[in-house]
Image (cartoon, rainbow, N blue to C red):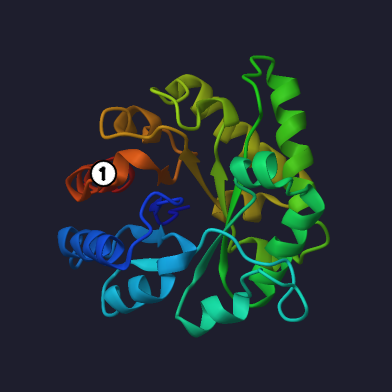
């Protein structure tokens, strides 16, 4: 089954001014003009999401929020409602990043609520999963990932789950000099697809997209994506230069579409 390749990028809170954020995403839109074969999304810092939305109008790049409230509406002071992201034209929501869990004590229950809400509102969750330390034991790694996946999906209808993008981000590789080695990444993506197949259905396992995040660069993207179960990448700091982003995108397109 042909799954559309994905290249996403998150700016975390590195790019927080209107001028810098709009300059950056306009440059991304320019270097990817008319590129429709690869799905692209950006997660700007929440404080500049409105100007980024304006800057991306008419482009082929989708955008969304790095985080949302688990509740759509109500007395939740300081939270960002999904209603606002939808109103701005956002289509994607990043959910469950390791930093949200480690620094802000986000639980799997909260991740489930956010995933469920995002799907019910017709948006695409980019659901981050990954083990805290390298687990060379295949069974241990599979068990840890299965726990995260099943808790995050909960009772969500299988028909909705198909829209999820699973972002495999081994916590021990985030922000490091190098990504996890390709063989480890490939085996883990196989395990994730196995989990979805065994827990849901073959059809869902074949259609859901699984991307890799964690120190992705133009130097390692070819090797990482050279496996049928890796559908793209989730870029961090190595994509802050639009030229690097373009090179990564072109490589993913070449590998996944054999173009």
User: Which of 168 and 192 lies nearest the eye of the viewer?
Assistant: 168
Q: Is residue 37 above or below residue 206?
A: below
Task: Give the x, y percent position of residue 234.
Answer: 43, 45
In the rendered image, the residue lying farthest to the top is 136
Task: Give the x, y percent position of residue 83.
Answer: 60, 81
Q: Is residue 147 above or below residue 166?
A: above
Task: Give the x, y percent position of residue 210.
Answer: 53, 46
Q: Residue at x 71, y 29 (%)?
A: 142
Q: Is residue 149 above or below residue 77?
A: above
Q: Is residue 174 above or below residue 133?
A: below
| Left or right of 93 on screen, residue 214 | left
**Label 1 sits on residue:** 258
Tally of numbered tags: 1
User: Which of 39 and 88 lies nearest the eye of the viewer?
Assistant: 88
Q: Residue at x 44, y 25 (%)?
A: 176
On the image, which quarter does residue 53 sit in? bottom left
| Left or right of 161 on screen, residue 21 | left
User: Which of 50 and 203 lies nearest the eye of the viewer?
Assistant: 50
Q: Can the viewer see residue 104 in this picture?
A: yes
Other residues around mark 1 within 10 Å, as few (<14) / some (14–19) / many (≥20): few
Q: Residue at x 35, y 54 (%)?
A: 15
Q: Can the viewer see residue 153 in this picture?
A: no
Q: Please, what secondary structure does the residue beneath circle 1 have?
A: loop
């Amino acid at each position: 089954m042909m799954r559309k390749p994905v290249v996403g990028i998150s700016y975390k809170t590195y790019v927080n001014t209107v001028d810098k954020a709009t300059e950056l995403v306009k440059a991304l839109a320019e270097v990817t003009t008319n590129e429709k074969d690869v799905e692209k999304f950006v997660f700007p810092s929440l404080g500049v999401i409105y100007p980024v939305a304006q800057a991306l109008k008419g482009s082929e790049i989708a955008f969304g929020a790095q985080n949302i409230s688990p509740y759509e509406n109500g007395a939740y002071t300081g939270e960002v409602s999904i209603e606002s992201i939808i109103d701005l034209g956002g289509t994607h929501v990043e959910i469950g990043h390791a930093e949200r869990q480690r620094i802000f004590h986000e639980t799997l229950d909260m991740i489930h609520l956010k995933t469920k809400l995002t799907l019910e509102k017709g948006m695409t969750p980019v659901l981050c999963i990954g083990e805290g330390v390298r687990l060379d034991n295949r069974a241990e790694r599979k068990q840890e990932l299965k726990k995260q996946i099943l808790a995050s999906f909960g009772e969500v209808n299988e028909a909705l789950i198909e829209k999820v993008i699973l972002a495999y981000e081994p916590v021990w590789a985030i922000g490091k000099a190098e990504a996890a080695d390709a063989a480890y990444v490939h085996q883990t993506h196989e395990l994730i697809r196995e989990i979805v197949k065994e827990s849901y259905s073959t059809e869902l396992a074949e259609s859901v997209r699984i991307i890799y995040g964690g120190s992705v660069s133009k130097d390692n993207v070819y090797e990482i994506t050279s496996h049928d179960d890796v559908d793209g990448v989730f870029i961090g700091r190595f994509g802050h230069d639009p030229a690097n982003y373009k090179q990564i995108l072109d490589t993913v397109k070449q590998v996944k579409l054999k173009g």
